[in-house]
Amino acid sequence: MTGLRWPAAIVTALLGIASAGSAQQNAPAAPGSGSGEQSPASETLNFAVEWRLIPAGTAKLTWTPLPSSAISASEAQLHLESAGLVSRLFHVNDDYTSMLGQNFCGQNTFMAAHEGNRSRETRVTYDQLERKARYTEKDLVKNSTTTHEVDIPACTHDVLGGLMVLRMLRIEPGKTVQIPVSDGKKVAQVKIESQRREEISTPSGMRKTIRYEIFLFDNVLYKRSGHLHIWLTDDNLRLPVQLQVHLQFAIGTITFRLEKPEKS
């Protein structure tokens, strides 16, 4: 089990789902804002993480608008931490911060990852004028640095900004969209497929949802083979009540279940 690298799979699941970017050209309204005339307060989503039905950790996703900004800027933060048996075998304590501009276009991201005996800091800068994404990763244990640069569309969403935009899309079951996604190292046209309406059980009761599949694996953005699904509530809030990644047999299924959304 120690060699299964489930933490990397979890990061891929939560960050990967967020990179389902934008098919809208106009500025979308923020989640739950209705007409979009008034910006909502910050939102916090708390997830319980399961690996093969075993409690594996928690994830906390926070979005905060910056009302003083003239370009509708906002900040998204993700904290991911392992727990229980999994944590004893491979402790994970990751923090990811994303600064977003108008239309949730990525400006820059920073990730501090502490996983087992590894410690890394990763920065990505999205230059909309030059249409470049610049990636820098520092290995704090080996004292080494890795850099990449890729060409990107003028408005490219990072992983968390992309999740915010995905919640604005109204893709009816049976429909698909394709959008450009970059993680700072690679750019890909990613297909989002709206599959079907489902009623699923959540900690807050039964919820009506729409299930989507985001095609990030199998050499699209990530080399590994897998499937990634997200269930958004079929209402104006479009809450991501469940995320699930299915990887090769050695890792299996990892599930995120929304425990409680918070607004302030």
Image: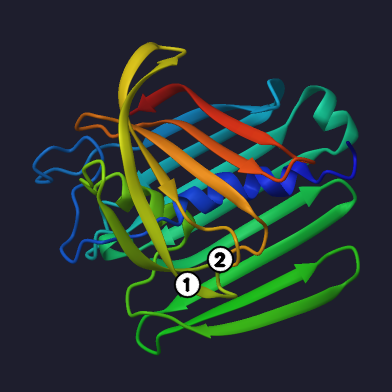
- Could you tell me residue 197's position as x and y percent? 29, 29
Q: In this orientation, which residue lies closer to the viewer: 78 or 16?
A: 16
In the rendered image, is residue 219 in sight? yes
Residue 5 lies left or right of residue 181; in this view the side is: right
Residue drawn at point x = 46 percent, y = 50 percent: 18
Q: Is the residue under label 1 in contact with that under label 2 (CB below 8 Å)?
A: yes
264 w.r.t. 160: above or below = above
Q: Which residue corresponds to mark 2? A: 221
Q: Secondary structure at mark 2?
A: loop
Q: Amino acid at mark 2?
A: Leu
Name above or below for residue 220 compared with residue 94.
Answer: below
For the residue pair 4 and 252, the one nearer the viewer reads as: 252
Residue extending furthest front? Answer: 174
Residue drawn at point x = 89 percent, y = 63 percent: 141
Q: Quadrant of residue 6?
A: top right
Q: Which residue is mark 1?
A: 188
